[in-house]
Image (tube, helix red, strand yellow):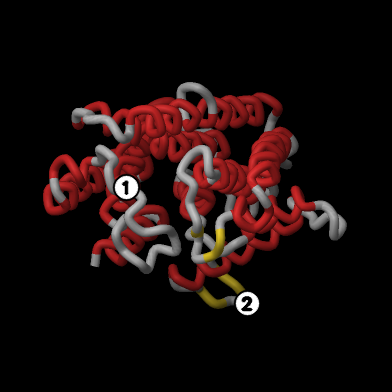
Amino acid sequence: MTAQTAGKTLDPDEELTLLKEALQRRLDQLLPAGNQHDLVSAAMREGTLAQGKRIRPLLLILTARDLGCDAHHPGLLDLACAVEMVHAASLMLDDVPCMDNAMLRRGSPTIHRQFGEYVAILAAVALLSNAFGVVAAADGFSNESRNQAVSELSAAVGLQGLVQGQFRDLSEGSLPRGEDDIAATNELKTSMLFGATLQIAAIAADAAPMVCQRLRCFARDLGQAFQLLDDLADGHSDTGKDIDKDLGKSTLVATLGAEAVRQRLREHLHSADDHFVHACGPQGSTRRFLYSWFERQLA
């Protein structure tokens, strides 16, 4: 993966397209198809290979590069794929009937609708297992670096990360909540995996502790911005997901109104950008990628 091919310097959109294609090919290799009766493997592939935004793996690769990691590092793509597997697993579990009971994801029927609820749950568990195995076997890293990456991913998934966030959302989301409680749940549900993604990028680049701390702050703001954007889009029909799933939930949109949430979203983006500049400098692909992406979503 490089910003040049056949002597030609690629523009940012072309580079992102090539990165997405590389991610898709590697995910296809890491999740081989089973036989025609292997529904769990089929569900794993459907839930992961379906075309998504790939924000997290792209963020990992671009940030690692901006921090000085070799673009040709043999294990970087695998680390990015592992993060995408975790994200896909979280979506599959989020959608099952005992949780959000969603009907659509990425414009297609959810995995439990296609394969059944127990297959979706087993496929999600298998994806999580695969993700940790991919990190543990990633080429070109020391055992210490792999262990650190596994630890970051484990913390993001576990009881102080995605699991706790999902529990709070399910148990408290329909109850009256204050702004701080809503933001705390959003951090667990969204910021924590962004945090692990960026810390793994820092590990790949052997970044300094101060850089790692700035990236943690960046991830907190970025996760809040993403969750607010998701809440604002809830009633729209072009998201590839069910509409109005947040009706009756105590989101910040319901509490503050859409215009106030848009303002808060931009404040989080401004804060995130400040942290990122202190970590990686004002130049680089990551800032350009995120700025362009959010501007399109908010247009």
Q: Residue at x 33, y 43 (%)?
A: 222
**Location of residue 10 in the rendering, given as x and y in whole percent from the top left corner:** 50, 73
Nearer-the-camera pick, 284 or 30: 30
The residue lying at 44 percent from left, 33 percent from top is 166
CA–CA distance between discs 1 and 2? Answer: 48 Å
In the displayed structure, does residue 285 sit left or right of residue 265? right
Q: Secondary structure at mark 1?
A: loop
Which class describes the residues within 10 Å of circle 2: few (<14), some (14-19), or many (20+)?
A: few
Q: Examine the rendering and report whether any part of residue 209 can be seen.
A: yes
- In the picture of the structure, the residue carrying the numbered disc 1 is 246
* Residue toward you, 138 or 262: 262
| Quadrant in the picture for residue 209 | top left
Residue 73 % position (x, y): 65, 49
Name which residue type carries label 2.
Ala
For badge 1, the amino acid type reads Asp
In the orientation shown, which residue stands out farthest toward the top? 159
Residue 222 lies, with reference to residue 286, above or below; the image says: above
Residue 6 marker: 2
SS type, badge 2:
loop
Expressed as whole percent of the image width and height from the top left, the position of residue 287 reads 35, 54
Closer-to-camera residue (80/264): 264
Q: Badge 1 local density, few (<14 within 10 Å), some, or many (20+)?
A: some
Nearer-N-terminus badge (1/2): 2
Residue located 69% across and 55% down the image: 45
Q: Is residue 295 left or right of residue 80?
A: left
Front position in the image: 114 or 154: 114
